[in-house]
Image (cartoon, rainbow, N blue to C red):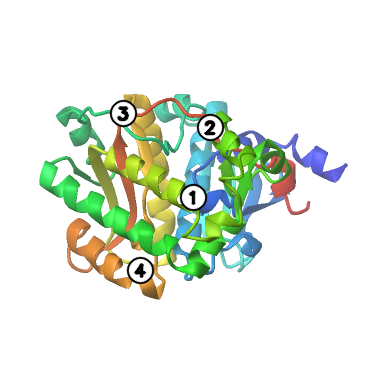
Amino acid sequence: MECCRGLRRPPAFALSYALLAPNPHNRQPWLIDLEKDNQFALYRDETRDLPHTDPYHRQIFIGLGCFLELMSIAATLRNKTAKIELFPEIPDDAVARVQLAEGGDVDPLADHILARRSCKEPFLDKPVPKDMAIALGGYGTVFTEDKEVDRIRALTWEAWLTEMHTHRTLKESVDLMRFGKTEINADPDGIDLGGPFLESLMLAGILTRENQLDPRTTGFQEGIKLYREMLSATPAYIALTTAENNRQDQIDAGRRWLRLNLETTRLGLALHPVSQALQEFDEMEPHYHRAHELLANPGETVQMLGRLGYGPETPPTPRWPLATRIMNE
């Protein structure tokens, strides 16, 4: 098969790692055209957009930036350097064209690719050490002071409630939920709901797609309780900002967010994006402005906000195989 031959090409090694990049709602919005042996073009899969929570595709492009950076880091494991041209003239609808060149040192963050997780669990009641906070300052602004953390925690909670109580944004998420092993295996994208505890709630009829859309149900209220416990157990935050908010800025923010993910993994810290307050739909506007007051200098755009702390080990998020993300040859 053509696709199988493509998987033996040199870029396939780096691309197979790039699939593990964090991205909004685990939509995996990347499509790849393997143009030559050491060259490929990256496209945005528009069928994986999030029109209600991400109406201007800002988060999607951040996810594509994560993909490009993880690919670039993985390429160094084969002593290759990724030369990335963003938004090339030909093909003019590509996000990037990438050429893999010989040479270059292994990126020290490459050792942590397979261990990286987005930890959606309560963190331990343990502060982030000052030396680690200082080390992470090269990626964004770290907030560890109690008053700052309390204000950001309140913001993230209120913003999450706004998304949950806005029907169209809630439905966008619920439509992407995968309930239990069978659904997760059939569609390894979106929001996976698995594990013994959640599956016991499914068997009891407490956790269903229908009741996740109805704020009056026990299942909905249980979800709110779990999320509140998680957000409350947060000792620190980190915010990534850019001077402007064009596509290049969004890609660059994604690349920085990916490196931050690997650096926190290296340090033994957990990281979890909580960027609901940065979403650009009408009902979120008050929280969006508040986020920029708290997290950015005047004129800057906050691209990502994450919880920082010490969390439990969590399983990997499912991914579509590389063959399903290759367009043609």
Q: Are marks 4 and 3 in contact (CB under 8 Å)?
A: no
Q: Residues within 10 Å of mark 1 (few under 14, many from 20)?
A: some
Residue assigned mark 4: 284
Q: Secondary structure at mark 2?
A: helix
Which numbered disc, 2 or 4, marks the residue that appears first in the sequence?
Answer: 2
Alpha carbon distance from label 1 to label 4: 25 Å
**Considering depth in this image, is 159 or 100 the residue closer to the camera?**
159
Residue assigned mark 1: 218
**Is residue 60 depicted above or below 320 in this figure?**
below
Which numbered disc, 1 or 3, marks the residue that appears first in the sequence?
Answer: 1
Percent position (x, y) of residue 190? Answer: 59, 50
Q: Is residue 87 visible?
A: no
Determine the image quadrant of residue 128. top left
Q: Residues within 10 Å of mark 3 (few under 14, many from 20)?
A: many
Which numbered disc, 2 or 3, marks the residue that appears first in the sequence?
Answer: 2
Q: Residues within 10 Å of mark 4 (few under 14, many from 20)?
A: many
Amino acid type at mark 4: Met
Residue assigned mark 2: 197
Amino acid type at mark 3: Tyr
Name the front one of labels 1 and 3: 1
Amino acid type at mark 1: Thr
Q: Secondary structure at mark 3?
A: loop
